[in-house]
């Protein structure tokens, strides 16, 4: 009973970003709005279930909170403007930061001086992101921040001669 009550009062992130860089979800008064009607259903379904409102992804996609413009999806989270850019054509069409504070993309992208960039290379380091507004500022926590280096999220752990191989070798001795 206590676990059930704690789950219902836990503060969920205002923003969730999949480690692919092509799916974002923003919490609205009606529930979480997701940036894709289909695709990445495992992540979207988990987000919606953990929000305590396990609706179909298509329902969450239909909520207001995100503004879709072709292959770009815009979100205002507090004072922060986020743009999710999917695909190389959409990225090539983006002028500078496009007025966003944060760019999220499933493509490789060079850093920009006027905004924070989360591209596919950065997601390989961080994993998925969860964002909360703390003291008026959108602050992200990555999967890597939460879990640390694990076999499934750290290439160097999986490589020959990496930490896992050394652990196995020491166990055999």
Image: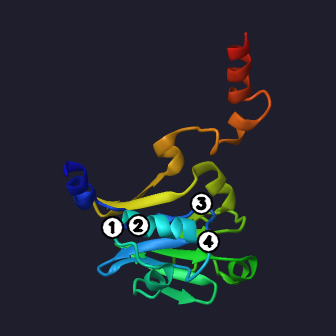
Q: Position of residue 129 (x, y in %)?
A: 50, 58
Q: Which residue, given by chain and number where applicable, does mark 2 sit on? A: 49
Crowding at dot 2, Cα within 10 Å, few <14 / some 14-19 / many 20+, comes out as few
- Residue at numbered disc 4: 22
In the picture, residue 92 is in which quadrant? bottom right
Whole-percent x, y for residue 156 in the image: 71, 36
| Gap between marks 4 and 2 measured at Cα | 20 Å
Disc number lying in front (3 or 1): 1
Under tag 1, what secondary structure? Answer: loop
Q: From this view, report whether residue 46 is shown above or below residue 76.
A: above
Residue that appears at 46% across and 44% down: 146
Chain-order first, disc 4 or disc 2: 4
- Asked which secondary structure carries label 4, the reply is loop
Q: Mark 3 or mark 1: which comes first in sequence? A: 3
Q: CA distance from mark 2 to mark 3?
A: 18 Å
Q: Nearer the viewer, residue 136 or 132?
A: 132
- Numbered disc total: 4
Secondary structure beneath dot 3 equals loop
Per the image, the residue denoted by label 1 is: 52
For the residues bearing labels 2 and 1, Cβ distance under 8 angstroms: yes
Asked if the residue under mark 1 is in contact with the one under mark 3, i.e. CB atoms within 8 Å, the reply is no
Q: CA distance from mark 3 to mark 1?
A: 22 Å
Quarter of the image holding residue 162? Answer: top right
| Disc 4 versus disc 2: nearer the observer | 2
Whole-percent x, y for residue 24 in the image: 51, 71
Which mark is in front, 4 or 1?
1
Label 4, label 3: how far apart the Cα atoms are: 8 Å
The disc label shown at residue 19, or none: 3
């Amino acid at each position: 009973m206590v676990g059930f009550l704690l789950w219902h009062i836990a503060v969920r992130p205002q923003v969730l970003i999949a480690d692919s860089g092509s799916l974002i979800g923003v919490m609205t008064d009606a529930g979480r709005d997701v940036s894709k009607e289909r695709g990445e259903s495992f992540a979207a379904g988990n987000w919606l279930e953990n929000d305590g409102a396990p609706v179909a992804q298509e329902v969450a996609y239909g909520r207001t909170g995100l503004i879709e413009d072709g292959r770009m999806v815009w979100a205002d989270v507090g004072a922060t403007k986020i743009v999710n850019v999917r695909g190389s054509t959409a990225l090539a069409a983006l002028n500078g930061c496009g007025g966003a504070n944060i760019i999220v993309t499933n493509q490789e992208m060079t850093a920009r001086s006027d905004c924070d960039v989360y591209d596919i290379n950065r997601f390989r380091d961080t994993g998925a992101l969860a964002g909360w507004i703390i003291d008026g500022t959108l602050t992200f926590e990555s999967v890597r921040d939460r879990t640390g280096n694990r076999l499934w999220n750290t290439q160097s752990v999986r490589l020959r001669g990496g930490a896992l191989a050394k652990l196995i070798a020491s166990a055999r001795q």
